[in-house]
Image (cartoon, helix red, strand yellow):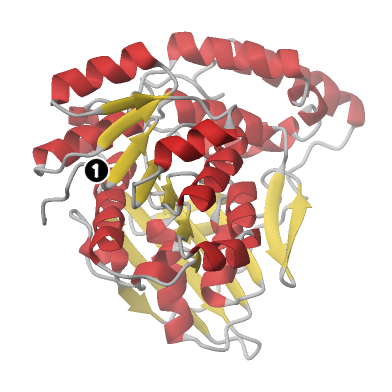
């Protein structure tokens, strides 16, 4: 990797779990980003340890944030929840003429970025959220499928990962649970119940039952491929599917501020991001399937590094690309910015495996539901209370590596 002058790029939220991992890897590679964040003491301590410069500022003062970004070519934004922080930071980057990158997986943030396309063109900056595991590998799989089946009308994406959660990811997922499921239908993002579609999928590690989730590719894959119908899946045992469907009946409770605050407070106490040893032992399997009106189907699979290591390496590759290459301003997805082969250039990734399978029939989404409303309500309340109590299936214990559920509700 080419050495980059420390005045050219910044990591905001460097004292968070993923931000710190990116900062440490950057230094290991001989890079010298400026570290920044809202907590002066924590950012200063990390900067001192790593021998880097730092800045401390919040995002509640747009003029101050814009001023702090002056002179920086690239911002790597790692401070969530992105539902709150992405808009002021994107605006600050537009004002300062600084490329914007982040590691979000939130559909609303990707849609916000696309809405700022003309402003980004006028400012000649790149706005490209999702340059981590959310959504580099799935976005690249989507782009590859579009190349293989140009007239595709339907796209399904998914991943099989046992990586644990950082506190920030867990909090973001808690917010997402209240919003229910999301798919793209006829080009429009559409709300659906959680786990509305269940089917069998071989993500690359054997066939498993899987459920649909509101993942960021519902937004980004459309801008990458133009395919109008998009769903995203993760492996899900029967208990998770049942729990997800039951949560549909208490989602109004999850929207209450005090409930969100209670869950997030418990996350602060209980959730710790996975350590290096755990991360190294957990590869990820990424899958995608495209079909056209004639019933032709293409499938793409790829094995990658664990989600956090891929985020670290992937974000640094994109940062250096923007520092070293002139790029026209606008809103981008990772594959649109750097090509469908981006994921294959990230350490720990294998090649794309392309096949022409027979399209599998979905499992009925209704036959296994409990019918009586009273049972739904009573059981749903029980599920919610178990969730607050950290039942191992519902969904916060980071010691359990068989975890998908918080990510699934992101």
* Residue 267 percent location from the top left of the image: 51, 16
Question: Which residue is located at x 37 percent, y 79 percent?
Answer: 355
Query: Residue 125 appears in which quarter of the rendering?
Result: bottom left
* Residue 53 percent location from the top left of the image: 22, 28
Q: Secondary structure at mark 1?
A: loop
Question: Where does the C terminus fall, quadrant-wise?
Answer: top right
Q: Which residue matches tag 1? A: 7
Residue at the limit of the structure toward the right, as seen here: 373
* Residue 134 percent location from the top left of the image: 44, 49
* Residue 58 percent location from the top left of the image: 50, 25
Query: Residue 259 appears in which quarter of the rendering?
Result: top right
Question: Which residue is located at x 76 percent, y 35 percent?
Answer: 248
Pick whichever, 308 or 236, lies toward us: 308
The answer to whether 184 appears left or right of 163 in the picture is right
Vertically, is 338 above or below 115?
below
Question: Where does the N terminus fall, quadrant-wise?
Answer: bottom left
In this orientation, does residue 409 appear?
Answer: no
Number of other residues with Cα within 10 Å of mark 1, as a class: few under 14, some 14 to 19, many 20 or more: some
Vertically, is 137 above or below 41?
below
Question: Which residue is located at x 54 percent, y 47 percent?
Answer: 90
Question: Which residue is located at x 32 percent, y 15 percent?
Answer: 42
Vertically, is 257 above or below 162?
above
Vertically, is 175 above or below 221?
above
The answer to whether 5 appears left or right of 203 in the picture is left
């Amino acid at each position: 990797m080419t050495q980059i002058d420390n005045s050219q790029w910044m990591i905001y939220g460097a004292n968070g779990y993923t931000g710190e991992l990116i900062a440490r890897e950057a230094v290991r590679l001989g890079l010298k980003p400026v570290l920044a964040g809202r907590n002066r003491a924590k950012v200063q301590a990390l900067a001192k340890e790593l021998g880097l410069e730092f800045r401390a500022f919040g995002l509640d003062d747009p003029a101050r944030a814009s001023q702090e970004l002056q002179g920086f070519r690239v911002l790597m934004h790692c401070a969530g929840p992105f539902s709150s922080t992405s808009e002021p930071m994107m605006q600050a980057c537009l004002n300062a003429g600084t490329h914007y990158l982040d590691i979000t997986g939130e559909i609303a943030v990707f849609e916000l970025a696309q809405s700022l396309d003309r402003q980004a063109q006028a400012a000649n900056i790149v706005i490209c959220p999702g340059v981590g595991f959310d959504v580099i590998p799935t976005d690249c799989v989507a782009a590859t499928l579009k190349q293989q089946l140009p007239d595709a009308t339907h796209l399904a994406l998914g991943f099989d990962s046992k990586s644990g959660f950082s506190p920030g990811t867990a909090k973001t997922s808690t917010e997402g649970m209240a919003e229910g499921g999301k798919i793209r239908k006829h080009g429009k993002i559409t709300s659906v119940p959680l786990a509305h579609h269940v089917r069998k999928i071989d993500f690359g590690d054997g066939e498993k039952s899987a459920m649909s989730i509101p993942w960021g590719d519902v937004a980004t894959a459309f801008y990458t491929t133009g395919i109008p119908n998009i769903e995203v899946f993760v492996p899900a045992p029967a208990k998770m599917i049942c729990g997800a469907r039951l949560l549909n009946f208490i989602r109004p409770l999850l929207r209450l501020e005090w409930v969100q605050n209670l869950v997030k407070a418990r996350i602060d106490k209980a959730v710790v991001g996975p350590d290096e040893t755990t991360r190294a032992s957990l590869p990820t399997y990424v899958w995608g399937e495209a079909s056209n009106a004639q019933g032709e189907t293409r499938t793409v699979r790829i094995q990658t590094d664990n989600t956090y290591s891929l985020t670290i390496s992937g974000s640094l590759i994109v940062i250096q690309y923007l520092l070293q290459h002139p790029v026209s301003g606008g809103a981008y997805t990772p594959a649109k910015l750097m090509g469908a082969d981006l994921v294959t250039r990230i350490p720990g990734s294998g090649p794309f495996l392309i096949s022409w399978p027979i399209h599998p029939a979905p499992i009925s989404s209704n036959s296994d539901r409990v019918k009586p409303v009273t049972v739904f309500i009573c059981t749903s309340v029980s599920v919610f209370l178990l969730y607050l109590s950290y039942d191992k299936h519902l969904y916060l214990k980071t010691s359990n590596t068989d975890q998908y559920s918080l990510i699934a509700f992101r």
